Image (cartoon, rainbow, N blue to C red):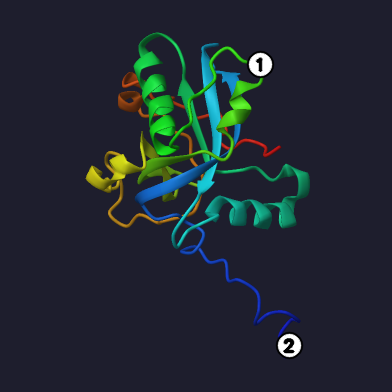
Amino acid sequence: MIKKPQGYDEAQAYTGESMQLPAGLYICKIRQVSETQSQNERPQMAILFDIAEGEHKDFYQSQYELAKSMSGDKAKWKGVYKQIMDGSSLPFFKGLMTSIERSNPGYQFPWGQEGNEKTLIGKKFGAVMGREQFETDDHRMAFATKIFQIRSIDGLKDAKIPEDKLLENTASAAVSAPVSAPSSDPQLAGRGFMGIPDDIDEELPFM
């Protein structure tokens, strides 16, 4: 006979469905910012974010706490967005910063000040998030939810939820799994979005 563990009724149920963020339009909050380099040694901004409002508020915080309870210091924050800051990507970086400024009345990024990236912590922005299909290491088809566009919060009014982005020649019965997958979409990379190579973990440690 299996006895009900103490605290079972009060515990939150983590299922495959509940641990995957649906595609949608979200108001997000910045939790951490760092300046890093891409694999090609280009300067990029790495933003760790969470859902700020609505049914899925603190989604990534919940994921992180669960991972930390099981993996300790190896747990990583899964809400990550990276944007290259120079060259052909500069207009997209400016669009990111402009969207953040417009989403936070009275805020202007203090260029040239030491530690200015910390002023972004707590700021909100609008995110258009969609699902992208990928193949897992054990050859299953799964989906990862990621940011397709960053907008001002007001700009979400005109945004549409993107359709699922499927792999070519994928099997008809795809499995939805709450797994973080890197983005290697050359079209996104060509438009200035950070294309994460397949062998690079998109998750980052949360400081």
For residue 95, say whether it is visible: yes
Q: 190 or 62: nearer the eye? A: 62
Check disc 1 and give the amino acid type: Glu
Q: x, y percentage for residue 87? A: 40, 8
Q: x, y percentage for residue 10? A: 66, 78
Q: Is residue 171 above or below residue 43?
A: below
Name the residue tied to disc 1: 114
Q: x, y percentage for residue 128? A: 34, 43
| Picture quadrant where residue 58 is located | bottom right
Callout in the foreground (2, 1): 1
| Picture quadrant where residue 127 is located | top left
Residue at (30% x, 25% y) in the render: 187
Left or right of 160 in this view: 59: right
For the residues bearing labels 2 and 1, Cβ distance under 8 angstroms: no
Other residues around mark 2 within 10 Å, as few (<14) / some (14–19) / many (≥20): few
Left or right of 5 in this view: 149: left
Question: Mark 2 or 1 closer to N-term?
Answer: 2
Outermost front residue: 106
Q: 36 or 124: nearer the eye? A: 124
Name the residue tied to disc 2: 3
Check disc 2 and give the amino acid type: Lys
For residue 202, say whether it is visible: no
